[in-house]
Amino acid sequence: MSRTTQDWQAADAAHFLHPFTDFDALAKKGSRIIERAENIYLWDSEGHKILDAMSGLWCVNVGYGRQELIDATTAQLKQLPFYNAFFQTATKPAIELAELLSEVTPPQFKHVFFSGSGSEGNDTVVRMVRRYWDVLGRPERKVIISRNNAYHGSTMAGASLGGMSGMHAQGGLPIPDITHIEQPYWYELGRGMSRDDFGLKAAGWLETKILEVGPERVAAFIGEPVQGAGGVIIPPATYWPAVQAICDKYDVLLVSDEVICGFGRTGHWWGCETMGTRPDLMTFAKGVTSGYIPLGGVMVGERIAKVLIEQGGEFNHGYTYSGHPVACAVALANIRLIQRDRLVERVRDDLGPYLAQHFEALKAHPLVGDAETCGLMGAVVLAKDRASGTPFASELEVGMVCRGHCFGNGLIMRAVGDRMIIAPPLVMTRDQIDEMMLLIRRCLDLTWADVRSRGWV
Ligand code: PMP
Protein backbone atom coordinates (compact mmCIF):
# COMPACT_ATOMS: atom_id res chain seq x y z
CA MET A 1 0.00 0.00 0.00
CA SER A 2 1.37 3.38 -0.90
CA ARG A 3 2.16 5.83 1.89
CA THR A 4 -0.05 8.84 2.57
CA THR A 5 1.33 12.34 3.12
CA GLN A 6 0.84 11.82 6.87
CA ASP A 7 2.87 8.60 6.71
CA TRP A 8 5.72 10.44 4.99
CA GLN A 9 5.56 13.26 7.52
CA ALA A 10 5.67 10.83 10.43
CA ALA A 11 8.70 9.00 9.01
CA ASP A 12 10.38 12.34 8.26
CA ALA A 13 9.82 13.56 11.83
CA ALA A 14 11.05 10.25 13.23
CA HIS A 15 14.38 10.11 11.38
CA PHE A 16 15.35 13.16 9.33
CA LEU A 17 17.05 16.18 10.95
CA HIS A 18 16.58 18.99 8.41
CA PRO A 19 19.12 21.79 7.81
CA PHE A 20 18.45 25.19 9.46
CA THR A 21 15.32 23.84 11.15
CA ASP A 22 13.73 23.85 14.60
CA PHE A 23 13.38 20.07 14.71
CA ASP A 24 10.59 19.96 17.27
CA ALA A 25 8.49 22.67 15.63
CA LEU A 26 8.75 20.96 12.23
CA ALA A 27 7.88 17.56 13.68
CA LYS A 28 4.68 19.04 15.11
CA LYS A 29 3.74 20.84 11.91
CA GLY A 30 4.86 18.24 9.35
CA SER A 31 7.02 18.85 6.27
CA ARG A 32 5.61 19.65 2.90
CA ILE A 33 6.63 16.69 0.76
CA ILE A 34 7.76 17.74 -2.72
CA GLU A 35 7.15 14.96 -5.18
CA ARG A 36 8.01 16.04 -8.70
CA ALA A 37 8.92 19.03 -10.84
CA GLU A 38 8.87 20.30 -14.42
CA ASN A 39 10.21 23.56 -15.86
CA ILE A 40 9.55 26.17 -13.10
CA TYR A 41 6.83 24.25 -11.26
CA LEU A 42 6.81 21.80 -8.35
CA TRP A 43 4.06 19.46 -7.20
CA ASP A 44 3.65 18.36 -3.59
CA SER A 45 2.34 15.03 -2.34
CA GLU A 46 -1.19 16.46 -2.16
CA GLY A 47 -1.07 17.35 -5.85
CA HIS A 48 -0.70 21.12 -5.34
CA LYS A 49 1.15 22.93 -8.13
CA ILE A 50 3.71 25.50 -6.91
CA LEU A 51 5.61 28.14 -8.89
CA ASP A 52 9.20 27.88 -7.68
CA ALA A 53 10.41 31.48 -7.58
CA MET A 54 13.52 30.42 -5.63
CA SER A 55 14.92 27.92 -8.20
CA GLY A 56 15.07 25.21 -5.54
CA LEU A 57 17.67 26.94 -3.38
CA TRP A 58 19.06 29.50 -5.87
CA CYS A 59 20.30 26.72 -8.10
CA VAL A 60 17.90 25.20 -10.66
CA ASN A 61 18.73 27.93 -13.16
CA VAL A 62 17.86 25.93 -16.29
CA GLY A 63 14.62 24.64 -14.79
CA TYR A 64 13.54 21.16 -13.84
CA GLY A 65 13.37 18.10 -16.08
CA ARG A 66 15.99 19.06 -18.69
CA GLN A 67 16.62 15.99 -20.83
CA GLU A 68 20.17 17.12 -21.74
CA LEU A 69 21.22 16.99 -18.10
CA ILE A 70 19.46 13.71 -17.44
CA ASP A 71 21.13 12.12 -20.48
CA ALA A 72 24.57 13.43 -19.47
CA THR A 73 24.10 11.93 -15.99
CA THR A 74 23.05 8.49 -17.14
CA ALA A 75 25.71 8.30 -19.85
CA GLN A 76 28.46 9.17 -17.38
CA LEU A 77 27.09 6.80 -14.72
CA LYS A 78 27.36 3.98 -17.26
CA GLN A 79 30.79 5.01 -18.52
CA LEU A 80 32.49 5.76 -15.19
CA PRO A 81 30.40 6.57 -12.10
CA PHE A 82 33.37 7.55 -9.96
CA TYR A 83 37.05 7.94 -9.91
CA ASN A 84 39.10 10.33 -7.81
CA ALA A 85 41.64 12.94 -8.80
CA PHE A 86 44.04 12.41 -5.89
CA PHE A 87 46.82 10.11 -6.97
CA GLN A 88 47.96 11.56 -10.25
CA THR A 89 44.79 10.51 -12.02
CA ALA A 90 42.06 12.48 -13.72
CA THR A 91 38.78 11.84 -15.51
CA LYS A 92 37.80 13.32 -18.86
CA PRO A 93 34.67 15.19 -17.67
CA ALA A 94 36.66 16.95 -14.92
CA ILE A 95 39.38 18.02 -17.36
CA GLU A 96 36.83 19.18 -19.90
CA LEU A 97 34.90 21.14 -17.28
CA ALA A 98 38.07 22.81 -16.00
CA GLU A 99 38.77 23.86 -19.60
CA LEU A 100 35.24 25.17 -20.18
CA LEU A 101 35.17 27.08 -16.87
CA SER A 102 38.34 28.89 -17.85
CA GLU A 103 36.54 29.96 -21.06
CA VAL A 104 33.40 31.31 -19.38
CA THR A 105 35.14 33.07 -16.48
CA PRO A 106 37.04 36.39 -16.62
CA PRO A 107 40.49 36.23 -18.25
CA GLN A 108 42.50 36.10 -15.00
CA PHE A 109 41.11 32.59 -14.37
CA LYS A 110 42.76 29.59 -15.98
CA HIS A 111 42.65 27.08 -13.11
CA VAL A 112 39.97 25.53 -10.92
CA PHE A 113 39.94 23.55 -7.67
CA PHE A 114 36.78 21.40 -7.37
CA SER A 115 34.75 20.81 -4.22
CA GLY A 116 31.39 19.22 -3.53
CA SER A 117 29.56 22.37 -2.39
CA GLY A 118 29.78 26.10 -1.87
CA SER A 119 30.71 25.72 1.79
CA GLU A 120 33.58 23.41 0.92
CA GLY A 121 34.61 25.84 -1.80
CA ASN A 122 34.93 28.57 0.82
CA ASP A 123 36.92 26.25 3.09
CA THR A 124 39.26 25.82 0.13
CA VAL A 125 39.43 29.61 -0.20
CA VAL A 126 40.60 29.98 3.40
CA ARG A 127 43.22 27.25 3.00
CA MET A 128 44.41 28.56 -0.34
CA VAL A 129 44.60 32.24 0.59
CA ARG A 130 46.67 31.46 3.68
CA ARG A 131 48.85 29.00 1.78
CA TYR A 132 49.51 31.61 -0.90
CA TRP A 133 50.84 34.15 1.60
CA ASP A 134 52.83 31.43 3.42
CA VAL A 135 54.54 30.39 0.20
CA LEU A 136 55.42 34.01 -0.48
CA GLY A 137 57.08 34.20 2.95
CA ARG A 138 54.30 36.34 4.44
CA PRO A 139 52.71 33.98 7.00
CA GLU A 140 51.50 36.92 9.09
CA ARG A 141 48.97 37.71 6.35
CA LYS A 142 46.21 35.48 7.73
CA VAL A 143 43.25 37.72 8.46
CA ILE A 144 40.25 37.45 6.16
CA ILE A 145 37.72 40.28 6.27
CA SER A 146 34.08 39.57 5.53
CA ARG A 147 30.77 41.33 6.26
CA ASN A 148 27.89 41.16 8.69
CA ASN A 149 24.88 39.35 7.25
CA ALA A 150 27.04 37.65 4.60
CA TYR A 151 26.40 33.97 3.86
CA HIS A 152 29.35 31.82 2.86
CA GLY A 153 28.19 28.37 3.94
CA SER A 154 27.75 26.22 6.98
CA THR A 155 31.05 24.39 7.49
CA MET A 156 33.36 25.75 10.21
CA ALA A 157 35.17 28.05 7.80
CA GLY A 158 32.08 28.87 5.73
CA ALA A 159 30.05 29.85 8.79
CA SER A 160 33.00 31.81 10.17
CA LEU A 161 33.34 33.78 6.95
CA GLY A 162 29.60 34.35 6.99
CA GLY A 163 28.27 37.16 9.11
CA MET A 164 25.22 35.48 10.62
CA SER A 165 25.23 36.04 14.37
CA GLY A 166 22.86 33.12 14.97
CA MET A 167 25.36 30.79 13.31
CA HIS A 168 28.36 32.21 15.19
CA ALA A 169 26.51 31.72 18.46
CA GLN A 170 26.32 27.95 17.92
CA GLY A 171 29.76 26.35 17.95
CA GLY A 172 32.15 29.05 19.07
CA LEU A 173 32.61 30.81 15.75
CA PRO A 174 34.22 32.53 14.00
CA ILE A 175 37.48 30.61 13.91
CA PRO A 176 40.56 32.81 14.54
CA ASP A 177 41.64 35.54 12.14
CA ILE A 178 38.30 36.10 10.47
CA THR A 179 36.71 39.49 11.12
CA HIS A 180 33.68 41.38 9.83
CA ILE A 181 32.63 44.84 8.74
CA GLU A 182 29.12 46.26 8.28
CA GLN A 183 27.20 45.35 5.12
CA PRO A 184 26.38 47.80 2.29
CA TYR A 185 22.64 47.81 3.07
CA TRP A 186 21.45 51.26 2.02
CA TYR A 187 17.78 50.85 3.03
CA GLU A 188 18.65 50.05 6.63
CA LEU A 189 21.90 51.95 7.16
CA GLY A 190 22.05 54.79 4.66
CA ARG A 191 18.64 56.18 3.82
CA GLY A 192 19.60 59.71 4.85
CA MET A 193 22.15 59.89 2.03
CA SER A 194 22.25 59.12 -1.70
CA ARG A 195 22.87 55.49 -2.63
CA ASP A 196 26.14 56.41 -4.32
CA ASP A 197 27.47 58.29 -1.31
CA PHE A 198 26.45 55.46 0.97
CA GLY A 199 28.24 52.95 -1.30
CA LEU A 200 31.49 54.88 -0.89
CA LYS A 201 30.97 55.16 2.84
CA ALA A 202 30.36 51.41 3.15
CA ALA A 203 33.49 50.64 1.12
CA GLY A 204 35.36 52.96 3.49
CA TRP A 205 34.55 50.59 6.34
CA LEU A 206 36.85 48.08 4.65
CA GLU A 207 39.76 50.52 4.65
CA THR A 208 39.12 51.37 8.30
CA LYS A 209 39.19 47.67 9.20
CA ILE A 210 42.37 47.02 7.18
CA LEU A 211 44.10 49.85 9.03
CA GLU A 212 42.77 48.62 12.37
CA VAL A 213 44.03 45.05 11.79
CA GLY A 214 47.24 46.27 10.16
CA PRO A 215 47.58 45.97 6.37
CA GLU A 216 50.54 43.60 6.74
CA ARG A 217 48.24 41.08 8.48
CA VAL A 218 45.30 41.15 6.05
CA ALA A 219 45.18 38.27 3.57
CA ALA A 220 41.88 38.79 1.76
CA PHE A 221 38.44 40.33 1.62
CA ILE A 222 35.47 38.11 0.69
CA GLY A 223 32.01 39.16 -0.41
CA GLU A 224 28.98 38.09 -2.41
CA PRO A 225 28.44 40.57 -5.30
CA VAL A 226 24.80 40.66 -4.17
CA GLN A 227 24.17 39.18 -0.71
CA GLY A 228 21.72 36.36 -1.36
CA ALA A 229 20.69 34.56 1.81
CA GLY A 230 21.07 37.84 3.71
CA GLY A 231 18.02 39.10 1.81
CA VAL A 232 19.10 39.98 -1.76
CA ILE A 233 20.96 43.07 -0.58
CA ILE A 234 21.99 44.90 -3.76
CA PRO A 235 24.88 47.28 -3.05
CA PRO A 236 25.01 50.78 -4.55
CA ALA A 237 26.87 50.93 -7.88
CA THR A 238 29.77 52.81 -6.26
CA TYR A 239 30.46 50.13 -3.66
CA TRP A 240 32.36 47.36 -5.44
CA PRO A 241 34.67 49.54 -7.58
CA ALA A 242 35.68 51.35 -4.37
CA VAL A 243 36.28 48.02 -2.61
CA GLN A 244 38.45 46.91 -5.53
CA ALA A 245 40.53 50.09 -5.26
CA ILE A 246 41.03 49.56 -1.52
CA CYS A 247 42.09 45.93 -2.03
CA ASP A 248 44.55 47.08 -4.71
CA LYS A 249 45.92 49.82 -2.47
CA TYR A 250 46.78 47.43 0.38
CA ASP A 251 47.55 44.37 -1.78
CA VAL A 252 44.64 42.47 -0.20
CA LEU A 253 43.28 39.55 -2.25
CA LEU A 254 39.68 39.94 -3.39
CA VAL A 255 37.43 36.87 -3.23
CA SER A 256 34.07 36.95 -4.98
CA ASP A 257 31.63 34.38 -3.62
CA GLU A 258 29.66 33.62 -6.78
CA VAL A 259 27.73 30.65 -5.41
CA ILE A 260 24.44 32.47 -6.08
CA CYS A 261 25.51 35.20 -8.49
CA GLY A 262 27.45 32.97 -10.89
CA PHE A 263 26.18 31.48 -14.15
CA GLY A 264 23.96 34.33 -15.25
CA ARG A 265 21.87 35.21 -12.21
CA THR A 266 22.78 38.92 -12.32
CA GLY A 267 22.65 39.26 -16.12
CA HIS A 268 26.34 38.57 -16.70
CA TRP A 269 28.09 35.25 -16.34
CA TRP A 270 29.51 36.42 -13.02
CA GLY A 271 28.35 38.89 -10.41
CA CYS A 272 31.82 40.46 -10.38
CA GLU A 273 31.29 41.41 -14.04
CA THR A 274 28.00 43.10 -13.16
CA MET A 275 29.64 44.92 -10.23
CA GLY A 276 32.94 45.82 -11.91
CA THR A 277 35.56 43.94 -9.89
CA ARG A 278 38.53 41.77 -10.86
CA PRO A 279 38.66 39.09 -8.14
CA ASP A 280 41.67 36.88 -7.40
CA LEU A 281 39.45 33.95 -6.43
CA MET A 282 35.82 33.06 -7.14
CA THR A 283 33.77 30.45 -5.30
CA PHE A 284 31.02 28.75 -7.31
CA ALA A 285 28.48 25.93 -6.75
CA LYS A 286 24.68 25.70 -7.26
CA GLY A 287 24.21 27.03 -10.83
CA VAL A 288 27.24 25.11 -12.14
CA THR A 289 25.03 22.00 -12.37
CA SER A 290 21.69 23.80 -11.89
CA GLY A 291 21.58 21.75 -8.70
CA TYR A 292 20.97 18.43 -10.50
CA ILE A 293 24.08 16.91 -8.85
CA PRO A 294 26.17 18.55 -6.08
CA LEU A 295 29.30 20.33 -7.27
CA GLY A 296 31.27 23.38 -6.21
CA GLY A 297 34.72 24.82 -6.57
CA VAL A 298 37.04 27.77 -6.63
CA MET A 299 38.34 29.58 -9.69
CA VAL A 300 41.94 30.44 -8.93
CA GLY A 301 43.38 33.58 -10.51
CA GLU A 302 46.73 33.30 -12.26
CA ARG A 303 48.41 35.47 -9.63
CA ILE A 304 47.71 32.77 -7.05
CA ALA A 305 47.85 29.72 -9.31
CA LYS A 306 51.35 30.66 -10.51
CA VAL A 307 52.72 30.87 -6.96
CA LEU A 308 51.06 27.62 -5.85
CA ILE A 309 52.19 25.77 -8.96
CA GLU A 310 55.74 27.10 -9.24
CA GLN A 311 56.70 27.48 -5.59
CA GLY A 312 54.05 25.73 -3.50
CA GLY A 313 54.96 22.02 -3.60
CA GLU A 314 52.17 19.75 -2.40
CA PHE A 315 48.94 21.48 -1.36
CA ASN A 316 47.64 19.30 1.47
CA HIS A 317 43.96 19.73 0.75
CA GLY A 318 41.20 18.04 -1.25
CA TYR A 319 37.92 16.17 -1.19
CA THR A 320 36.89 12.68 -2.30
CA TYR A 321 34.46 14.32 -4.67
CA SER A 322 36.83 17.00 -6.06
CA GLY A 323 36.08 16.67 -9.79
CA HIS A 324 33.42 13.96 -9.46
CA PRO A 325 32.98 12.73 -13.05
CA VAL A 326 29.16 12.55 -12.98
CA ALA A 327 28.83 16.01 -11.44
CA CYS A 328 31.30 17.38 -13.99
CA ALA A 329 29.45 15.73 -16.88
CA VAL A 330 26.21 17.35 -15.74
CA ALA A 331 27.96 20.70 -15.34
CA LEU A 332 29.27 20.45 -18.92
CA ALA A 333 25.76 19.76 -20.25
CA ASN A 334 24.34 22.55 -18.10
CA ILE A 335 26.86 25.19 -19.20
CA ARG A 336 26.50 24.22 -22.86
CA LEU A 337 22.75 24.58 -22.50
CA ILE A 338 23.16 28.04 -20.94
CA GLN A 339 25.40 28.99 -23.89
CA ARG A 340 23.15 27.45 -26.56
CA ASP A 341 19.97 29.08 -25.25
CA ARG A 342 21.77 32.38 -24.54
CA LEU A 343 20.26 32.44 -21.05
CA VAL A 344 22.72 34.99 -19.67
CA GLU A 345 21.97 37.43 -22.49
CA ARG A 346 18.22 36.83 -22.02
CA VAL A 347 18.50 37.80 -18.35
CA ARG A 348 20.57 40.87 -19.19
CA ASP A 349 18.56 42.18 -22.16
CA ASP A 350 15.04 40.94 -21.64
CA LEU A 351 13.95 39.15 -18.47
CA GLY A 352 16.00 41.24 -16.01
CA PRO A 353 14.69 44.62 -17.25
CA TYR A 354 11.17 43.15 -17.48
CA LEU A 355 11.29 41.96 -13.87
CA ALA A 356 12.73 45.32 -12.80
CA GLN A 357 9.71 47.13 -14.31
CA HIS A 358 7.34 44.90 -12.39
CA PHE A 359 9.23 45.46 -9.13
CA GLU A 360 9.26 49.21 -9.68
CA ALA A 361 5.46 49.08 -9.90
CA LEU A 362 5.28 47.16 -6.60
CA LYS A 363 6.59 50.25 -4.81
CA ALA A 364 3.07 51.72 -5.01
CA HIS A 365 1.67 48.89 -2.88
CA PRO A 366 0.72 50.10 0.64
CA LEU A 367 2.78 47.38 2.32
CA VAL A 368 5.96 47.89 0.30
CA GLY A 369 8.77 50.11 1.61
CA ASP A 370 11.20 49.29 -1.17
CA ALA A 371 11.54 46.89 -4.09
CA GLU A 372 14.67 46.20 -6.13
CA THR A 373 16.14 43.67 -8.53
CA CYS A 374 19.48 42.70 -10.01
CA GLY A 375 19.17 40.46 -13.06
CA LEU A 376 16.78 37.72 -12.04
CA MET A 377 16.88 38.19 -8.28
CA GLY A 378 14.69 40.57 -6.35
CA ALA A 379 13.59 41.75 -2.93
CA VAL A 380 10.49 43.46 -1.60
CA VAL A 381 10.71 45.14 1.81
CA LEU A 382 7.52 45.00 3.87
CA ALA A 383 7.28 48.22 5.90
CA LYS A 384 4.92 49.49 8.56
CA ASP A 385 5.21 53.02 7.20
CA ARG A 386 6.32 53.33 3.60
CA ALA A 387 7.11 57.01 3.66
CA SER A 388 9.48 56.92 6.63
CA GLY A 389 10.60 53.33 6.05
CA THR A 390 9.57 52.40 9.60
CA PRO A 391 9.78 48.62 9.91
CA PHE A 392 7.32 46.32 11.65
CA ALA A 393 8.38 45.08 15.09
CA SER A 394 10.49 42.01 14.33
CA GLU A 395 8.54 39.79 16.76
CA LEU A 396 5.42 40.22 14.58
CA GLU A 397 7.23 38.24 11.88
CA VAL A 398 5.30 39.90 9.07
CA GLY A 399 7.61 38.26 6.53
CA MET A 400 6.51 34.86 7.79
CA VAL A 401 2.86 35.90 7.55
CA CYS A 402 3.48 36.80 3.90
CA ARG A 403 5.38 33.58 3.34
CA GLY A 404 2.39 31.68 4.74
CA HIS A 405 0.19 33.27 2.07
CA CYS A 406 2.73 32.39 -0.62
CA PHE A 407 2.68 28.80 0.60
CA GLY A 408 -1.13 28.72 0.48
CA ASN A 409 -1.27 30.28 -2.99
CA GLY A 410 1.17 28.09 -4.87
CA LEU A 411 4.22 30.36 -4.79
CA ILE A 412 7.62 29.77 -3.28
CA MET A 413 9.03 33.10 -2.16
CA ARG A 414 11.42 33.33 0.76
CA ALA A 415 11.20 35.62 3.80
CA VAL A 416 14.43 37.03 5.27
CA GLY A 417 13.05 39.04 8.15
CA ASP A 418 10.61 41.34 6.35
CA ARG A 419 12.44 41.16 3.02
CA MET A 420 10.53 38.90 0.63
CA ILE A 421 12.95 37.55 -1.95
CA ILE A 422 12.94 35.70 -5.26
CA ALA A 423 15.53 34.16 -7.57
CA PRO A 424 13.49 32.33 -10.22
CA PRO A 425 14.86 30.01 -12.93
CA LEU A 426 16.59 31.81 -15.81
CA VAL A 427 14.43 29.94 -18.32
CA MET A 428 11.24 31.77 -17.37
CA THR A 429 9.15 33.36 -20.12
CA ARG A 430 7.67 36.84 -19.86
CA ASP A 431 4.24 35.21 -19.43
CA GLN A 432 5.59 33.24 -16.48
CA ILE A 433 6.99 36.42 -14.95
CA ASP A 434 3.49 37.94 -15.30
CA GLU A 435 2.03 34.86 -13.64
CA MET A 436 4.57 35.07 -10.78
CA MET A 437 3.89 38.79 -10.28
CA LEU A 438 0.12 38.15 -10.04
CA LEU A 439 0.82 35.65 -7.27
CA ILE A 440 3.21 38.04 -5.52
CA ARG A 441 0.60 40.81 -5.62
CA ARG A 442 -2.11 38.51 -4.34
CA CYS A 443 0.10 37.47 -1.41
CA LEU A 444 1.01 41.09 -0.63
CA ASP A 445 -2.71 42.02 -0.68
CA LEU A 446 -3.57 39.16 1.67
CA THR A 447 -0.72 40.12 4.01
CA TRP A 448 -1.82 43.76 3.96
CA ALA A 449 -5.37 42.68 4.88
CA ASP A 450 -3.91 40.60 7.73
CA VAL A 451 -1.74 43.33 9.21
CA ARG A 452 -4.64 45.78 9.07
CA SER A 453 -7.12 43.42 10.67
CA ARG A 454 -4.60 42.69 13.45
CA GLY A 455 -4.09 46.40 14.04
CA TRP A 456 -0.37 46.31 13.17
CA VAL A 457 -0.52 49.44 11.00
N1 PMP B 1 28.13 30.96 -0.52
C1 PMP B 1 26.98 31.55 -0.84
C2 PMP B 1 26.99 32.96 -1.37
C3 PMP B 1 25.77 30.86 -0.70
O1 PMP B 1 24.62 31.46 -1.00
C4 PMP B 1 25.80 29.53 -0.23
C5 PMP B 1 24.53 28.70 -0.07
N2 PMP B 1 23.34 29.36 -0.09
C6 PMP B 1 27.04 28.96 0.10
C7 PMP B 1 28.18 29.71 -0.07
C8 PMP B 1 27.14 27.57 0.63
O2 PMP B 1 26.86 26.65 -0.36
P1 PMP B 1 26.46 25.15 0.04
O3 PMP B 1 25.12 25.22 0.72
O4 PMP B 1 26.44 24.47 -1.30
O5 PMP B 1 27.51 24.61 0.91
Image (cartoon, rainbow, N blue to C red):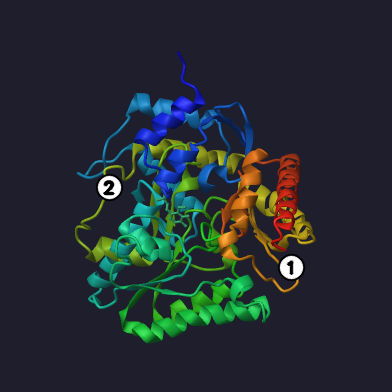
Answer above or below: position of 299 versus 144. Answer: above
Q: Quadrant of residue 415?
A: bottom right
Q: Which amino acid type is shown beneath numbered disc 2?
A: Tyr
The picture places residue 341, in percent across and down from the top left corner, at 63, 40
Quadrant into which the N terminus falls: top left
Answer above or below: position of 79 versus 148. Answer: above
Circle 1 packing at 10 Å, graded few (<14), some (14-19), many (20+), is: some
- Classify residue 239 as left or right of residue 82: right
Q: For the residue labelled by badge 2, is the local secondary structure a helix, a strand or a loop?
A: loop
Location of mark 2 (residue): 319
Q: Is residue 236 visible?
A: no
At horizontal 34% and vertical 65% (from top left) the residue drawn is 304
The picture places residue 5, in percent across and down from the top left corner, at 50, 26
Q: Which numbered circle lies on residue 386?
A: 1
Give the camera-side residue of 367 and 25. Answer: 25
At horizontal 34% and vertical 49% (from top left) the residue drawn is 115
Q: Quadrant of residue 39?
A: top right
- Classify residue 191 as left or right of residue 159: right
For marks 2 and 1 on the same chain, the one whose residue lies earlier in the sequence: 2
Circle 2 packing at 10 Å, graded few (<14), some (14-19), many (20+), is: some
At horizontal 71% and vertical 44% (from top left) the residue drawn is 436
- Classify residue 81 as left or right of residue 147: left
Q: For the residue labelled by badge 1, is the local secondary structure a helix, a strand or a loop?
A: loop
Q: Which amino acid type is shown beneath numbered disc 1?
A: Arg
Mark 2 or mark 1, whichever is nearer to me: 1
Q: Quadrant of residue 164?
A: bottom left
Q: CA distance from mark 2 to mark 1?
A: 49 Å
